[in-house]
Image (tube, rainbow, N blue to C red):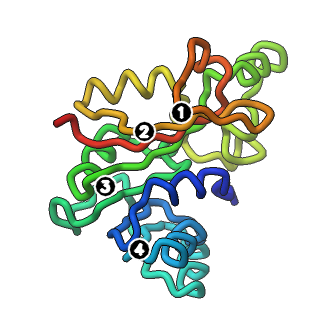
Amino acid sequence: MYKIPAQNFPIIEEWVAPGSRVLDLGCGDGSLLDTLITRKKVDGIGVEISHEMILQCIQKGICVYQADIDKDLSEWADSSFDYVILNSTLQVITRPYSVINEMLRVGDFAIISISNFGYIRNRIRVLSQGKVSSRIRLSESWHDTPVLRFVSLKEFRSSLKEIGVEIIDARYFFPMNMTTRTPGPAYNLLAREGIFKLRRIQ
């Protein structure tokens, strides 16, 4: 099973205010929520569809709901949370615009991370080997891969404008463990991943 990378945890921890209300969509085994609850004393709730992952959340003492986040978040009223997090899960969402809009309905801020399909190594691999990397697939082989939407960072940023969402803060991950706040001229080619703090355009 795909394991959510922990490289985003310190950034998310930096963005989330102490004592805030947090909803983590596709929370996996609850590691991120566990970190935020321990270090930032947040009031955290997870949403996960996998029975195995839910059991691991419960073992950590995390409040978790089993639900398909693709359907809607109608269980929660407007502004029920300060932050709604979707960490390394957007690619497997079938209705991404709807989910982002729902995130910013129930939460004041959304935090979303995505892998960059436009990353140069992904392009070279497709051209030279004729296949997508396991990092982008989120699994080792094609046959156990969830349905994915391949999106580049440039496409994602443009899409946010289309749906009235602004970027409050961002981090871009480059090779050799380099991370920047600003995208730079060749970010869509050189960045492996991006993480964004978002809100509805005021």
Give the Cα distance between marks 3 and 2: 28 Å
Circle 4: residue type:
Val
Quadrant showing the C terminus: top left
Give the Cα distance between marks 3 and 4: 26 Å
Label 2 Cα neighbours within 10 Å, binned few <14 / some 14-19 / many ≥20: some
The dot on residue 169 is 2
Please name the residue shown 41% across and 42% down the image.
94
Label 3 Cα neighbours within 10 Å, binned few <14 / some 14-19 / many ≥20: few
Contact, mark 3 vs mark 2 (Cβ under 8 Å): no
Closer to the chain start, of discs 3 and 4, is: 4
Circle 1: residue type:
Arg
Provide the secondary structure element on which disc 4 rests.
loop
Contact, mark 3 vs mark 4 (Cβ under 8 Å): no
Please name the residue shown 60% across and 51% down the image.
8
Label 1, on which residue? 181
Give the Cα distance between marks 3 and 1: 32 Å
Q: Nearer the viewer, mark 3 or mark 4?
A: 4
Label 4, on which residue? 42
Q: Nearer the viewer, mark 3 or mark 2?
A: 2
Please name the residue shown 44% across and 77% down the image.
41
Percent position of residue 145, x then y: 65, 46
The dot on residue 71 is 3
Percent position of residue 123, x then y: 71, 18
